[in-house]
Each structure stands twice: as structure tokens, then as C-alpha cells.
């Protein structure tokens, strides 16, 4: 089979192979009344199961023209104020969130056959909190933020190498240097869905829905 035969390659692929995936039972009747404790528990179980990069997630937004976009970003935290991530306000996702401050997050942990989907309005954290979050991270994270120009057209790879090297020097010399456009965002969920895959395809989908006075829960057909 030719390696560039996409259709043939797709037909050979399988999900949740028993060699790498364990599909634990999930009884939604035992789920907590609010989504955050369940998310925390599932995240810890993904880490324990050896899921690579369990803190990465797909962030989906809609731009000013109503065109959807999605990319992988890193979860910075999750608490009663929402699920948080960060980017430049001048980036594509930053501009999209300015035009339509509503987004969706998707976590996929295939070692356990699990997904978590979070949707809701997004708000920027205060500047001092955004900078504190950045400076709590690695020198590389600060250097990347100081490089700036995210999503802008790049003339050449050499231009990026020069800008990145200069940003690394600045980050090492002054670890407290601010990156003015770097912003922490929080998504406060309207809905949070927990998906547990099952070998017999009777997958469990439990959705939490914010009522404004608490949370309601319901099952969804897989």
C-alpha cells in the first residue's frame, strides 16, 4: 500500500485499541452536582493513565465575519471563575474573541476514550493578573510572548530566528518584563459535556447546563 494513499490509510485506522486504551465504566448517576469536580477528577485520571499533554485543548472561535476557526492551546487553569487560556489580544483568536466573546473548548484523552466539551462566554482577566500568569511560567513562555506578532505574516524564517533570539535575551535579562498584549482569558461555561466511550458503542454523554442559579444535568444520545 502506497504511503500517500490517504483513503487506504484511513481504512486501516482504528480508535481505542485495547493495547493502548482502557475504557472505564462511567455511571452518570454518581457524578457530582457541578462539573468542575468531575473535570478535575477526569484530568487527574488522564494524567495517571499516561495521556500525553492532557492539558492541551482545542479552542474554537468565530471571527467578525462569522467564520469559525480552531487551534490547540494550553489550559492555564479551571476554577469557579471559568476555564482559562492565554493569547495576544492582537492574534487571530484574540481579535475573534473581541468580535464574538464566546468560545468552545474540547479536551480529548484517547487513552481513556474520553472527551470534555466546554462552551460559554469569554472575558479577559485584568492586566496585572494576565502578566502574573505569564511570569509564573517558563523563560521560554515569556520569550515567545515578547517575540509578539502572533498570526501576522512573516517575511522569512530568518526574521523569526532573529526576533526570537532577541526575545530570549530580554527574557533572561529581565524575567519580570511585561508583554503588553499577552492576555489571560476565562471561559465561563454555559454547558460542559463529559463523553465516555464504550466498546459496545453505547457511549455515555452527560451534559451540565448552567441555569443562572446552579447546574442542571441531562444525558445525550451518543
Image (cartoon, rainbow, N blue to C red):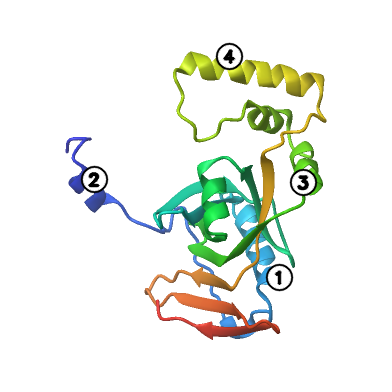
Counting residues from the start of the chain, the first of labels 4 and 1 encountered is 1
Quadrant position of residue 44: bottom right
Q: Residue under label 1, please give it.
A: 37
Q: Residues within 10 Å of mark 2 (few under 14, many from 20)?
A: few
Q: Residues within 10 Å of mark 4 (few under 14, many from 20)?
A: few
The quadrant of the image that shows the N terminus is top left
The number of discs equals: 4
Q: Residue at x 53, y 74 (%)?
A: 25
* CA gap, disc 4 and disc 2: 40 Å
Q: Position of residue 40 (x, y in %)?
A: 69, 64
Q: Residue under label 2, please give it.
A: 9
Quadrant position of residue 211: bottom right
Q: Residue at x 73, y 53 (%)?
A: 125
* CA gap, disc 3 and disc 1: 28 Å
Counting residues from the start of the chain, the first of labels 4 and 2 encountered is 2
Q: Is residue 99 visible from the viewing direction of this image?
A: yes
Q: Residue under label 3, please give it.
A: 127
Q: Secondary structure at mark 2?
A: helix
Q: Secondary structure at mark 1?
A: helix
Q: Nearer the viewer, mark 4 or mark 3?
A: 3
Q: Residue under label 4, please give it.
A: 162
* CA gap, disc 3 and disc 2: 48 Å
Q: Position of residue 200 (x, y in %)?
A: 37, 74
Counting residues from the start of the chain, the first of labels 3 and 2 encountered is 2
Q: Position of residue 170 (x, y in %)?
A: 74, 20
Amino acid at each position: 500500500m502506497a504511503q500517500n494513499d490517504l483513503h487506504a490509510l484511513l481504512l486501516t485506522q482504528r480508535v481505542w485499541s485495547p493495547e493502548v486504551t482502557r475504557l472505564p465504566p462511567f455511571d452518570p448517576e454518581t457524578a457530582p452536582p457541578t462539573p468542575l469536580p468531575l473535570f478535575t477528577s477526569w484530568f487527574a485520571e488522564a494524567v495517571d493513565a499516561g495521556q500525553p499533554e492532557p492539558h492541551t485543548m482545542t479552542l474554537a472561535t468565530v471571527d467578525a465575519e462569522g467564520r469559525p476557526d480552531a487551534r490547540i492551546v494550553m489550559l492555564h487553569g479551571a476554577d469557579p471563575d471559568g476555564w482559562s487560556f492565554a493569547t495576544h489580544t492582537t492574534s487571530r483568536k484574540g481579535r475573534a474573541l473581541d468580535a464574538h466573546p464566546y468560545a468552545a473548548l474540547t479536551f480529548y484523552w484517547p487513552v481513556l476514550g474520553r472527551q470534555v466539551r466546554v462552551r460559554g462566554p469569554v472575558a479577559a482577566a485584568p492586566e496585572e493578573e494576565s502578566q502574573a500568569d505569564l511570569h509564573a511560567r517558563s523563560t521560554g513562555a515569556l520569550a515567545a510572548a515578547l517575540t509578539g506578532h502572533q498570526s501576522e505574516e512573516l517575511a522569512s524564517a530568518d526574521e523569526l530566528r532573529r526576533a526570537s533570539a532577541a526575545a530570549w535575551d530580554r527574557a533572561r535579562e529581565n524575567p519580570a518584563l511585561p508583554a503588553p498584549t499577552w492576555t489571560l482569558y476565562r471561559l465561563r461555561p454555559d454547558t460542559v459535556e463529559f463523553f465516555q466511550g464504550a466498546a459496545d458503542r453505547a457511549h455515555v454523554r452527560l451534559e451540565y447546563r448552567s441555569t443562572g442559579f446552579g447546574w442542571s444535568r441531562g444525558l445525550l444520545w451518543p
